[in-house]
Image (cartoon, grey):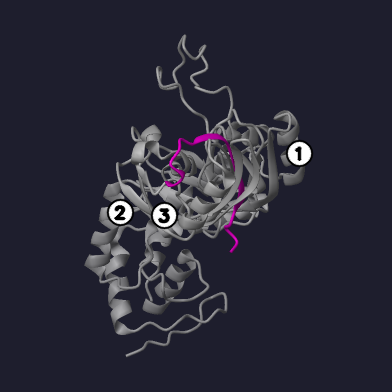
Amino acid sequence: MTVEPPAAPDGVPIFPIDATLEASARKAWPLGLCPECLGRLFGRHGHGLSNPERAVRIANAIGSPIPATPLEGCALCRGAFDRWETWISRGQRATEGLEYRRFACGSRWDPEILAREETIWSEVGATHAEAARGAFNREWGKRIEAATGIPGGPLDPEVVVLADLPAGRVEVTILPIYVRGRYRKLDRSIPQTRWPCRRCEGRGCEHCAGTGKTYPTSVEELVAAPFLATTHGEGTRFHGMGREDIDARMLGRGRPFVLEVLRPRVRTLDLIALSERAKVASEGRVEILEPVLAGPADVLRVKEATPEKSYRVGVRADVPVAKINEALSFVTGRAIAQRTPTRVAHRRSDLIRSRRIRHARVVEASEGRFTLDLRAEAGTYIKEWAEGDGGRTEPNLAGLIGAPVTVEFLDVLEIHDTE
């Protein structure tokens, strides 16, 4: 049977309770809980009410006033919901100096409290309770939002503040900034990413002059530098849609990438100006095209993409151009088997992969030197296809023309990721 008690003193109607909810309430009343924890036992009743308001209305409904909280504090939360000013202040101090437009709240609780909460739910038969952690996170977030004017919530936060209740401190997680774009590499002497010295594994030694690096700089470092300086971040991660060889240029529209800036303190960025700064600082070796703000899902898309690529490769071979044309005609559209190349066998699984060269043509020929334009499937090793790699690629250009082939240069002309 549903009990319809009179209106509460403030004139707001008391929500109806049935016999089961009333029985649960009477069991909970003597347990020494604060109004917040009492109200949370019935958190799915009385939409729009705070938990203390919910407790007042249930008290009126059962005709029993809310019992006083014990002097030693609430038997469940131990006063966690009585120290809002302290937690608001700690949250604001922890995020001081950070630029962010949205935040989320979290909390870490003593496992004994959480276990005790579940025991109480079972003892009183609370089937519509709200967990302490969820209630604390929500209420703390509402109060920080009111104090700062910055919206809070779990959707796309830029910082997460976490209250460590047992330790009495606040920890802050600053979410990364993601910038998506395309880079052009116009220098044949720099790798895509920072390359730790093999002898010291990045610690710094005589061989690398204390830098910890095999190469003085990289596309990653040249792209990241202005973004890192502007955001005051603590580091970066560079995610490319594949990579070109160190001695290959990346031309055309460039290679898609995502730059992840870790723990940035500033988030307002002029992406075009920063891209220009990267170009100037790199002395034109690297250019950034089409920079836009992105998200973590873009990292996955970039890393998992397998687009075809177009190349320009210069080769030397002592044969007439007709022989080259004949070989290209034979190989176009045909499957080639490539065993993991000798030059990368130390760091990649020894497998045989089937790849196809979609298009191939000679664009320039002069006294044993030929410039070829190719389009191939993702993962095709162009140098090894041309030179043969000791027979690890079959068929290969050298084998087809019956003469040694030397690759003199290689450029990536296009990443066909938008097709």
Which residue position holds label 1? 276
Q: Nearer the viewer, mark 3 or mark 2?
A: 3
Mark 1–mark 2 Cα distance, whole angstroms, equals 53 Å
Question: Which of disc 3 and disc 1 is earlier in sequence?
Answer: 1
Provide the residue span drawn in magenta: 400-419
Report the front residue among 310 and 336: 336
Q: Is residue 40 above or below residue 60?
A: above
Q: Which mark is residue 355?
A: 3
Q: Which residue is mark 2?
A: 114
Side of 221 where 279 appears, left or right: right
Residue mark closest to the camera, 1 vs 3:
3
* Residue type at the position of mark 3: Arg
Mark 1 or mark 2, earlier in chain: 2
- Position of residue 76 relative to residue 229, above or below, is below
Badge 1 element: helix
Amino acid carrying label 1: it is Glu
Image quarter of the N terminus:
bottom left
Viewer can see residue 174: no
